Amino acid sequence: MGRQVPTAIQTAADIRPAAEALRDIARELGNFRVAACANIASRSPMTDADGDVLASGVFGWPATKEQWWQKPLLALSSPLTFACRYENEPFWANAHGIHTRSPNPLLDQIDLSLFQGEVNANAVICVPVHMSFGQIAAISFSPFSDKRDDLSKEFDLYSDQLEYHARRFVHGYTRVSSQRPWIPKNCRLSKREVECLRWAAVGKTDVEIALILERSCATVRFHIHNAAIKLEAVNRSQTVFKATQLGYLGNVAAVMVPHPQIEAQVAAK
C-alpha cells in the first residue's frame, strides 16, 4: 500500500479530515490560516460530507471577517482571483505587488489599492490550481498575525509544501463533489475540425476561415457543424467553449517567443 497523504481525498467522508490536515500543516509551517475556494466561478462554498462550510467549521474564519465565502462578487473583485486567472504557479502578494517564482507581466496591471479589505489580510501566499474543463481553484494562506506584510521568506521556505498539499486537497475535493453532466464523453475531433475552431476562437468568420485555409465556406461550416455534433453543442459559441474546455484549442491568445539560438541556426541554413 502506498504512503497515505493526509490531505488526499478519496470519498466525501475524507473531506473534513483532509481539510483539518491542511489546516494543521499551514499552522505548523507558518502559523497560516487557510482560505480555500474550489471554483472561483462558483458561489458555492466548500463543504464537508454533512454540508458544513469548511471556511468557518474547519479553517476558523470568524463572522467578523464578513464571511468572505458568502460575498457574491468576490471572484470579480478580489485581486487574488484575478491573479489566479493569469498565473498557475504559487505566488505571494501584498498591497505593493504580486510576487511570483518567474516574472509574469500580466500581473502588473492588477489593482491592489484595496488589497487588505478585499483579501482580509496584509499579505498572503496563494496557490492557483488549474483543473480540467477550465475550472480554477484558489487556496490562500494568510498569517494569523495581521502585522506580517512581507512573506518572501515564508514563500521561499514553504511554498512547495503548501502547493503540494493544496493541490492534493482541491483535486480530491473536486473529484468527489462535482458532477459534469454537460461534458461530452469520448469526444474526438478531427484535425480539420480543430483547425476551423481555432480560427473561430480568435473571432474569424466562416468566410475568413475559408480564405485562410483555402477551402470553401461550405467546407468550413461542415467541419464546425460536425464538431458541434460531437461536442453536443447547440451553437457556434458553445462549440468553441466546449472545445476549449477539453483542451482542443490550447491557448489561442499565446504567441510563441522565438529562441535566439534556434533563429540563428535557421538563418545560417
Image: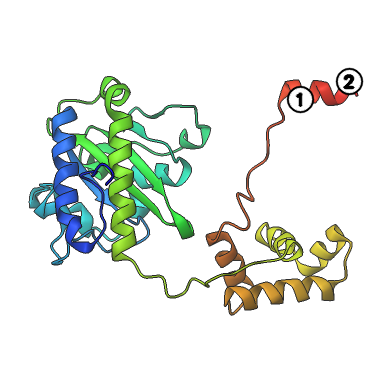
**Residue depicted at 49% across the width and 71% down the height:** 183
Quadrant placement of the C terminus: top right
CA neighbours of label 1 inside 10 A, class few (<14), some (14 to 19), many (20+): few
Q: Mark 1: which amino acid?
A: Ile
**Residue depicted at 34% across the width and 60% down the height:** 175
**Residue depicted at 55% across the width and 61% down the height:** 246
96 vs 230: above or below? above
Q: Residue 226, image x and y in percent?
A: 70, 76
CA neighbours of label 2 inside 10 A, class few (<14), some (14 to 19), many (20+): few
Q: Mark 2: which amino acid?
A: Ala
Q: Please, what secondary structure does the residue beneath circle 1 have?
A: helix
Q: Please, what secondary structure does the residue beneath circle 2 have?
A: helix
Q: CA distance from mark 2 to mark 1?
A: 10 Å
Q: Quadrant of residue 145?
A: top left
Q: Residue 23, image x and y in percent?
A: 16, 42
Going by the image, does 193 lie left or right of 269?
left
Comparing 87 with 120, the one in front is 87
- Count how many numbered circles sit on residues in the image: 2
Q: Quadrant of residue 99?
A: top left
Name the residue beneath numbered marker 2.
Answer: 268
Going by the image, does 105 lie left or right of 202?
left
Q: Residue 153, image x and y in percent?
A: 27, 19
Comparing 83 with 158, the one in front is 158
Q: Quadrant of residue 46?
A: bottom left
Asked whether the viewer can see residue 94, the reply is no
**Residue depicted at 42% across the width and 57% down the height:** 135
Name the residue beneath numbered marker 1.
Answer: 262
- Precedes in sequence: disc 2 or disc 1: 1
Comparing 231 with 205, the one in front is 231
